[in-house]
Image (cartoon, helix red, strand yellow):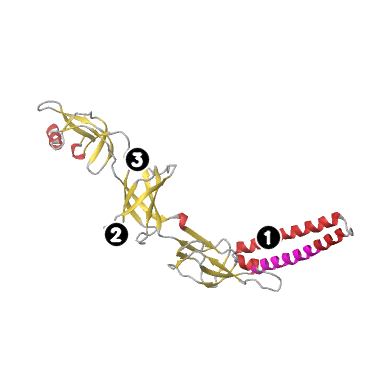
Amino acid sequence: IDKVKKQPFSPILDLPGSVNFDMTRVADVGGRISGRITRAMVVPGQKVKKGDALVEIEGADLGGALSSLLSAKANLAAARAQATREENLAREQLTTGAALEQARAHAKALEAEVKGAEQHLLAMGVSPSSVGGMSEGRTGPRRIVLRSPIAGEVIELHAVLGQVVDPTHPVLRVADLGVLWIQLDVFEVDLARVHQGDKVKIITEAYPDRIFSGTVDHIESYIDEQTRTARVRIIVDNTDRLLRPGQFIHAQLSPKSTEGSSIVIPRRAVVQIDGEPTAFVQTGARRFEPRPLQLGSQSESEVEVAHGLLENDRLVVEGAFALKSEMLR
């Protein structure tokens, strides 16, 4: 016989989940121009640094963009020369102010045209040094080199030598696998017990004796109408590269202790009578009363009682099944 008492209760949540990329550490590298792949400098699984060359693309669009820049620069040079002549004539009062302003405005407009042509080439992937040094008589690059925007590992390579690609075609995916996300689906009834910063233990079938540690980073602000769950994102360190995106895991989430306390009793004190969870309370020397229970959260060895027991009730723990058998005889 134990006395019923209130105590803090934070049962561990056992949840299934899956390993995903940290989407802040993933980059899809697109074609940038319509063209043909002439060289691939990496293979899947290869580690790269930010700025490393990945793939080389040759395309007609590049030639047109280079011609547009050279033409704009030539027109700008002529317009600036004309503006200088107008300024000299204006000092000698041999031209009108309107003609001078028109020459200056024309030069300004062509400066904007040059800037636009340069930005077009930069957007295609031409290096700033190549764009800045381009002038009449100097041929620009014939091919675009796609470079890695982040340090990481080449996860996917979607194109092969000679394949035609366009700007909407993803050519490679690079990801930093040193940190990963784990997605857990938490039922609506348990959401109030999950908080940012909660610690999580992660177990995998691949390494059953290894416990990985993570932390709750984000709890989605909506609930899936079909599953009645909300996704919880866990951040986990993966420096040793044992976890892999797409892998299924089992997580044990330890909610932070909440203020207040609840009536908590051993699970072995609860029996089922007519399909209802029930406990026995001693009401006299040899008198026992069955109490239907409304249960709350549960752990492996304890259960929270929302209704049915009062503090200081004398609870039958070890003999509950014997009393049930006697009562149903």
Q: Sequence-wise, which precedes: disc 3 or disc 2? A: 3
Q: Does the magenta stretch include residue 24?
A: no
Residue under numbered circle 2: 207
Q: Element at badge 2?
A: loop
Asked whether the beta carbons under mark 3 and mark 2 sit within 8 Å of each other, the answer is no
Task: Identify the disc placed on residue 115.
Answer: 1
Q: Sequence-wise, which precedes: disc 3 or disc 1? A: 1
Q: Where is residue 291 in the image (x, y as percent from the top left)?
A: 21, 30
Crowd band around label 3 with a 10 angstrom C-alpha radius: few (<14), some (14–19), many (20+) = some
In the image, residue 108 sits, relative to residue 316, either above or below, namely below
- Residue at position x 67%, y 68% from top? 66
Task: Identify the disc placed on residue 58.
Answer: none
Q: Which of marks 1 and 2 is in front?
A: 1
Q: Separation of disc 1 and disc 2 at Cα?
A: 56 Å
In the image, residue 185 sits, relative to residue 54, either above or below, namely above
Q: Separation of disc 3 and disc 1 at Cα?
A: 56 Å
- Indicate left or right for 74 with 175 as reference: right
Q: Where is residue 147 in the image (x, y as percent from the top left)?
A: 53, 66
Crowd band around label 1 with a 10 angstrom C-alpha radius: few (<14), some (14–19), many (20+) = few
Residue range highlighted in magenta: 62-82
Q: Element at badge 1?
A: helix
Residue under numbered circle 3: 193
